[in-house]
Image: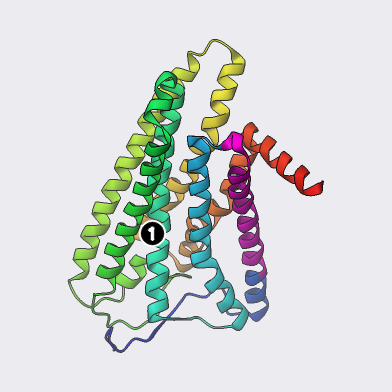
Amino acid sequence: MSNSSSITQFLLLAFTDTRELQLLHFWLFLGIYLAALLGNGLIITTIAWDQHLHSPMFFFLLNLSLLDLGCISTTLPKSMANSLWDTRAISYMGCAAQMFCFVFFISAELYLLTVMSYDRYVAICKPLHYGTLLGNRACVHMAAAAWATGFLTALLHTANTFSLPLCKGNGLGQFFCEIPQILKLSCSHSYLRELGLLEFSGSLTFMCFIFIVVSYVQIFRAVLRIPSEQGRHKAFSTCLPHLAVVSLFISTASFVYLKPPSISSPSLDLLVSVLYSVVPPAVNPLIYSMRNQELKDALNKLTDSFKN
């Protein structure tokens, strides 16, 4: 038995013990990571470069890409390094830092997606008030609020989780440091305090989800009233990418935290954690670049300028 003061490192869950499969895991994650870096990097560069994309929708998209880059950079590099060097270890402070960064980016992304649904609601349902409700200052304030709220959420959860006494070893059932995995090592009833915080965060997440659903109900009602097919197509083309990203993000994360223990297993937990921590940051740029014509045109201009 050990307590938290004697723990200097944690052992992450390995995807496999076979050396060949470890190297396969390394190359697979490296490919996903490079694709995420390229996709999100192109979106950030394109929006910053093209003056026509300096609008609230693309400003929030730029922030989303920054959060996606931060999220995937928190989990994948360490997992790839462990597979490459055939180790499972992560230092105590490294684990705390990884947990803080992951909760920060994932929480800020949820709040930002909520803000983005409000942006689409105003653009479709109240177009005449769009410039007033979503001016430059308002957009900066809303984006800053999403980042700040994510930071405070991460600080609160990390400080509370790592203040718990740990006496059930140092093995984690996940490929990165996650709050539920640390709580399983606690030997004190103080972990109920963190469970309370998780329930509070879950309530905020549910409120964000309800806000997004209500916003899109109003959006689709307004879009269906647009007389021209071209107008409906343009409205859907700006809303569907955001809705797809929200659906992917919330459905995978909800399954991780709400699935019953009876269907839990190490292999299933690994698969689902990859779905909500790795897949969205890698897929989001593809969703937006395929569905948004303005972004596609700007990307083509950017690539043409490099060729010339």
Query: Does 41 lie within the magenta span?
Result: yes
Quadrant position of the N terminus in the picture? bottom left
75 relative position to 111: left or right:
right
Magenta range is 27-53
For mark 1, give the secondary structure: helix
Question: How many neighbours does mark 1 have within 10 angstroms: few (below 14), some (14-19), or many (20 or more)?
Answer: many
Say which of 144 and 261 sits in front. Answer: 144
Q: Mark 1 points at which residue?
A: 104
Where residue 249 appears, as percent x and y from the top left, is 46, 48
The image's colour scheme reads rainbow
The residue shown at (60%, 47%) is 43
Q: In this view, does 246 lie above or below 261?
A: above
Query: Does 73 lie within the magenta span?
Result: no
The residue shown at (28%, 47%) is 204
* Residue 304 location, quadrant: top right
Q: Is residue 224 above or below residue 205?
A: above
* Residue 24 location, quadrant: bottom right
Where residue 270 appears, as percent x and y from the top left, is 49, 64
